[in-house]
């Protein structure tokens, strides 16, 4: 008979960017305080963004959102609403911290807000909606009220907050034990990253440890993001694997 | 009752402030498992997509019990309410790896079966720890069915059927194109009948389920309200629930042979095939893609035929469909009776004038063309034409001699044609390509041949764009093979690659066997001509390409 211990020892040869995305996505999926808007791990190209409208139980869907050269489509988008305030964590994921690039945070934000020659998501109409409880989506037709189609576009700017971040794998990605982590080095790297890229507010490192290659997370937030309730909620989401 | 049992060791990071990492949960209640399956996927979302099917207990009849393993690679344990609550584990193994053929797992479930990475493959871990061949495979698509979208992934359907692996292609029943900024609606995008027909034909030929699963979306009702063509009973389609029933019964039968599971499997197969036939029936007579040969074929000719029952039975017995419903036996006589005159649209900017004037102009028939064009075309196929013939007379002449002319399966623009007059074809090729190897010419037609040669299935193949991916074209020849397996044989299939952008060193690329665009040709065709270089090769001799390239047959 196959036993669980044998199964758990069945490991991929590498975790990489996919492991980073998979860990965060699965953590997001098993809680309800933070809403996952979009997830796009390597090996596919998803295009559907589901956004929770504040002060309602309605989710609005933007589908067929393309990759564009003028902005960076995030790999993971998380949302937290506080009364009328709407906050988004926009994460770019890569294999290594050295894969960071200039204007990463700005470019992630511009996917929502738009840039020259690119109409951002918020300026486009939503095409579907449903309540949190419903299984089926309803179409928002071109004849429907602007308040349904373009509510995001007309939403007060002051009520929308974008928190771009960068998530990457530890290099090398596996350690025998968490105790062997050189946390000072990691903290220094994160601080350096965020100093040189001030448009990045979150640095989230994912590593794997032990015989079973369990994922763990070391995160650093900017002071501004760290002071938000969203930061606490995100920590709660990461809690099962978070190294504090 | 549900619970999550993660591994974890109260991890501590040196020099890190607080050290509460993870929850120390041991496996102290190891369940006895009736079977373990591995769910390999292109990524975690695809694996999860399938896991959500099993989680839908109202349909799957599996109840979720526990979760083990790591958060990024969980093992999900279910109880089968239809089989004494036996426990079945599904281990999610997300991400095959990059674009190459290697995978990141010790076991490669794609090996020797799939040319391309597929969204989900489920295998069983046997008691000795060895993994079985795939139990089934799934491809999820939510892209618009625009242009050649349907062709792109078609090799996966063929790979699965040829290896005896059940395959599900899950796609929306309709979508809607928008302008580039997503502000306004353009046109609805319908399912393509050809991919549905191709998969039905694979079911027919191999007796292996190659199924299309149609998902409803909010566009379906919108399209219906506006009078767009949808299957009459689309609201009653089983959609994903069909797929769940199918997959779960395959799993049950893989664990234990049970009459109940067999009956359920056969029933859901009938339902899925009925929906596929319904889709094929409506879209074979649709707009610019009227498919007369198929539209007149028994499974589609009449509503409420017993074709779904016949197909389901054949697949339960793993044998080809026999009799009038056997789509894989569509032959030259079907083309002669119902086929259309061939017409292929190739832009002048994409191909040489030699190809346009000396090849395509002699394959393409359009009654709107001028008399001189039509007379030249008819004469090329050995039809006597009086010099004084009017345009209408030439049209009549073409109709009278249609069996001798290039015929195709689709009205309007098409992708390939059947040519019975091989001698005339040889003459056309000799004239267009004076340096063409005599072996290719003799493959086309040899005077000394004693036997009557079967018709040639000629595919003018673009292949190389100025930029971008060749993936859509890679699926074309496999799709044509799936639709007409008795006609795209080594003796009959001729491909002319006509793109101006075809690399001059195409022979070495073919020889290497490392390029999937060319592999898609060499797996099927008997001869290959490259317009740009004016030469070609015969592909019957398998030593010309590396051993690993096998034909589908």
Image (tube, coloured by chain):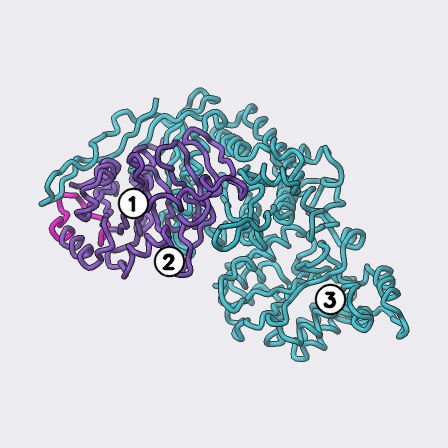
Chain colours: A purple, B cyan
Residue at 39%, 61% (x, y): give it: A116
**Crowd class of label 2 (few under 14; some 14 to 19; many from 20; radius 10 Å):** some
Q: Is residue B297 magenta?
A: no
Label 3: which residue? Answer: B363
Residue B158 point in image, percent of width and height: 57, 49
Between A124 and B103, the residue placed more toward the observer is: A124
Q: Real-space Cα distance between discs 2 and 1?
A: 19 Å
Residue at 53%, 62% (x, y): give it: B517
Residue A92 point in image, percent of width and height: 31, 52
Number of numbered tags placed on the structure image? 3
Q: Is residue A180 magenta?
A: yes
Residue B388 image-quadrant placement: bottom right
Residue at 34%, 46% (x, y): give it: A76
Label 2: which residue? Answer: A115
Q: Are marks 2 and 3 in contact (CB under 8 Å)?
A: no
Label 1: which residue? Answer: A158
Q: Are marks 3 and 1 in contact (CB under 8 Å)?
A: no
Left-right relation of A155 to B331: left
Between B360 and B390, the residue placed more toward the observer is: B390
Between B529 and A50, the residue placed more toward the observer is: A50
Left-right relation of B25 to B101: left
Residue B133 appears anywhere in the view = no
Residue interval drawn in magenta? A170-186
User: Dot 2: what SS?
Assistant: loop
Q: Nearer the observer, disc 2 or disc 3? A: 2
User: Dot 1: what SS?
Assistant: helix
User: Dot 3: what SS?
Assistant: helix
Q: Is residue B146 above or below residue B383?
A: above
Q: Nearer the observer, disc 3 or disc 1? A: 1
């Amino acid at each position: 008979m196959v036993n669980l211990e044998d199964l758990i020892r069945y490991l991929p040869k590498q975790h990489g960017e996919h492991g980073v995305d998979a860990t965060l996505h699965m953590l997001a999926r098993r809680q309800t305080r933070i809403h996952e808007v979009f997830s796009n791990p390597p090996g596919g190209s998803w295009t559907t963004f589901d956004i929770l409208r504040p002060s309602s139980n309605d989710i609005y869907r933007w589908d067929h959102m393309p990759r564009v050269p003028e902005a960076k489509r995030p790999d993971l988008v998380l949302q937290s609403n506080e009364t009328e305030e709407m906050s988004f964590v926009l994460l770019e994921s890569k294999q290594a911290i050295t894969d960071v690039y200039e204007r990463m945070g700005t470019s992630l934000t511009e996917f929502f807000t738009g840039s020259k020659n690119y109409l951002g998501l918020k300026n486009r109409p939503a095409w579907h909606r449903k309540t949190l409880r419903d299984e089926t989506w309803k179409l928002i037709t071109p004849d429907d009220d602007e308040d349904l189609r373009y509510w995001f576009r007309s939403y007060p700017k002051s009520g929308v907050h974008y928190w771009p971040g960068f998530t990457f794998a530890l290099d090398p990605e596996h350690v025998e034990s968490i105790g062997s982590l050189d946390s000072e080095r990691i903290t220094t790297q994160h601080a350096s990253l965020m100093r040189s890229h001030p448009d990045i507010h979150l640095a989230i490192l994912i590593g794997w440890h032990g015989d079973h290659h369990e994922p763990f997370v070391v995160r650093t937030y900017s002071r501004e993001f760290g002071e938000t309730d969203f930061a606490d909620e995100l920590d709660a989401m990461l809690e099962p694997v978070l190294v504090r | 009752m549900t619970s999550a049992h993660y591994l974890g060791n109260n991890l501590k990071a040196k020099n890190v402030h607080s050290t509460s990492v993870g929850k120390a949960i041991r496996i102290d209640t190891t369940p006895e498992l009736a079977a373990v399956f591995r769910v390999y996927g292109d990524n975690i979302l695809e694996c999860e997509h399938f896991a959500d099917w099993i989680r839908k207990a109202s349909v799957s009849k599996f109840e979720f019990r526990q979760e083990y393993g790591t958060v990024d690679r969980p093992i999900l344990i279910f109880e089968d309410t239809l089989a004494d609550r036996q426990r079945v584990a599904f281990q999610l193994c997300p991400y095959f790896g990059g674009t190459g053929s290697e995978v990141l797992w010790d076991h490669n479930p794609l090996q020797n079966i799939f040319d391309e990475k597929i969204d989900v493959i489920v295998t069983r871990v046997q008691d000795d720890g060895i993994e079985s061949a795939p139990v089934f495979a799934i491809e999820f698509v939510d892209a618009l069915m625009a242009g050649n979208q349907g062709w792109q992934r078609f090799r996966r359907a063929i790979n699965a059927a040829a290896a005896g692996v059940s395959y599900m292609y899950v796609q929306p029943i309709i979508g809607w194109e928008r302008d580039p900024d997503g502000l306004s609606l353009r046109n609805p995008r319908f399912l393509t009948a050809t991919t549905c027909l191709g998969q039905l034909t694979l079911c027919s030929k191999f007796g292996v389920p190659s199924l299309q699963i149609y998902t409803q979306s909010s566009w379906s009702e919108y399209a219906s309200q506006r009078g767009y063509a949808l299957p009459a009973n689309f609201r009653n389609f089983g959609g994903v629930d069909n797929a769940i029933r199918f997959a779960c019964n395959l799993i049950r039968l893989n664990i234990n042979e049970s009459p109940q599971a067999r009956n359920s499997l056969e029933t859901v197969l009938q339902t899925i095939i009925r929906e596929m036939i319904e889709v094929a029936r409506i879209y074979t007579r649709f707009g610019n893609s009227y498919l007369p040969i198929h539209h007149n074929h028994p499974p589609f000719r009449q509503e409420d035929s017993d074709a779904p029952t016949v197909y389901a039975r054949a697949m339960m017995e793993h044998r080809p469909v026999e009799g009038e419903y056997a789509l894989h036996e569509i032959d030259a006589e079907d083309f002669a009776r119902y086929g259309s005159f061939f017409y292929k649209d190739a832009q002048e900017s994409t191909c040489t004038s030699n190809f346009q004037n000396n090849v395509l102009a002699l394959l393409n028939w359009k009654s709107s063309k001028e008399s001189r064009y039509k007379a030249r075309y008819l004469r090329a196929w050995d039809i006597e034409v009086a010099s004084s013939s009017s345009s209408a007379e030439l049209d009549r002449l073409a109709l009278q001699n249609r069996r001798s002319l290039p015929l195709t399966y689709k009205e309007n623009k098409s992708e390939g044609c059947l040519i019975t007059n091989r001698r005339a074809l040889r003459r056309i090729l000799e004239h267009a390509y004076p340096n063409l190897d005599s072996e290719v010419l003799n493959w086309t037609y040899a005077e000394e041949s004693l036997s009557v040669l079967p018709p040639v299935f000629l595919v003018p193949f673009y292949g190389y764009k100025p930029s971008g991916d060749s993936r859509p074209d890679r699926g074309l020849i496999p799709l044509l093979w799936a639709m007409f397996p008795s006609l795209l044989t080594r003796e009959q299939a001729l491909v002319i690659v006509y793109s101006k952008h075809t690399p001059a060193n195409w022979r070495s690329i073919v020889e290497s066997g490392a390029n999937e665009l060319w592999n898609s040709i060499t797996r099927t065709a008997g001869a290959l001509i490259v317009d740009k270089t004016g030469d070609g090769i015969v592909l019957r001799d398998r030593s010309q390409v590396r051993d690993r390239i096998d034909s589908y047959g």
